[in-house]
Image (cartoon, rainbow, N blue to C red):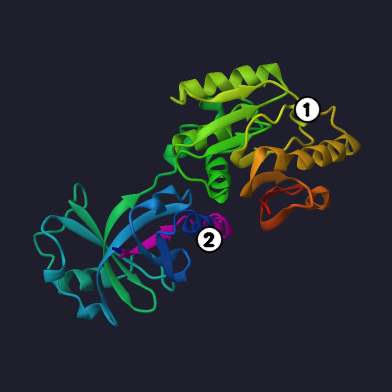
Amino acid sequence: MKEPIILEFYKDFPDAALHELNAIRDTFGTIDLMEIHFPFALVMSKGRDFQRLTYLKEASVVIAESEKYEGFSSTQLPEGKYYIRIKDPMKCHGTSDEPLLGNILNSIGRVDFRSPDFVVNAFHLSKWYLTRRTYSNSNATYNERRAPLRPFFSPVSLHPRIARLMVNLARVKPGDTLFDPFCGTGGILIEAGKIGLKVVGNDISLQMFSGAKLNLKYFGIRDAVFFNSDFTKLNASFKADAIVTDLPYGRNSHLSAVNIKDLYSRTFGRFPQFLKRGNYAVFMINDTSYLELLHPDMSVRETLSMRVHKSLTRHIIVSRYE
């Protein structure tokens, strides 16, 4: 049975948070979106598939709802110590209403900010929702896997949060096979392996090939398959459930604009040979004009743009093999 849960997202990349939520809904079919007032979303959820969300900050199970918070009572809370937070997208965090709500909930003797048994969140969306926080997602989890903290790294590696986002956008489930044809130091493969995917990596550089294998072993992913080859010449001996990759660009000085266009054309032409029909290829590029080179059976479903600095905007493309 599905239960009402309020999701709170990090605010730094709103488009990514919403696209990712839709992708997880498509993937598992266990989440119904009821209403959204960013950074909050009310969903009906069966299970905890929402915990895959990279940009999810907290999740809270709804205990009660009311048109006004005065309609809540202490009998609706479980036993134990707690503290209260009111979260209203139209007001600043930590309003003076929190002590008032505490009085309504008869919180005397139960408030504990240092070691609470649970946290009570009161959300004001289309109505008021009294909730108990059940899940918290810290950025520290991803920062521990940043490139400089790996045994082998490159300074141009994707941040683990972006890598995990791309994996989620590919709409894959545990046990599926994900292929990164330009795996570099293995950042995308690490995030895929961490959520139970089978991973296959390839890189033309022997140094990257060896470094990626070392990194995956370091993070406990020991059943990965690797190739050290030019992807455009790699034998298509398998079909993946998803392709997720950060395509080479100007970081390789030997790749001129002409060479990049040729590489992309040959790369896009090979995607269908390694991908199951009906499934997704998610890739990152710097220039969306290259999308005209896509294989005719690959359709663009979503585009997410991220400004890196003044002269560089990167684009996450979600494409489907029709």
Image: 103 above or below 137: below
- Give the residues in magenta: 2-19
* CA neighbours of label 1 inside 10 A, class few (<14), some (14 to 19), many (20+): few
Sequence-first disc among 1 and 2:
2
Q: Residue at (76%, 25%) from the top-left corner?
A: 230
Nearest the eye: 167 or 85: 167
Frontmost residue, 60 versus 320: 320
Q: Amino acid at mark 2?
A: Leu
Q: Secondary structure at mark 2?
A: helix
Residue 94: quadrant of the picture = bottom left
Q: Nearer the viewer, residue 91 or 255?
A: 255
Q: Amino acid at mark 1?
A: Lys
Q: Is residue 245 visible?
A: yes
Q: Is residue 244 left or right of residue 273?
A: left
Q: Residue at x 51, y 40 (%)?
A: 176
Q: Residue furthest right?
A: 258
Q: Position of residue 299 (x, y in %)?
A: 72, 55
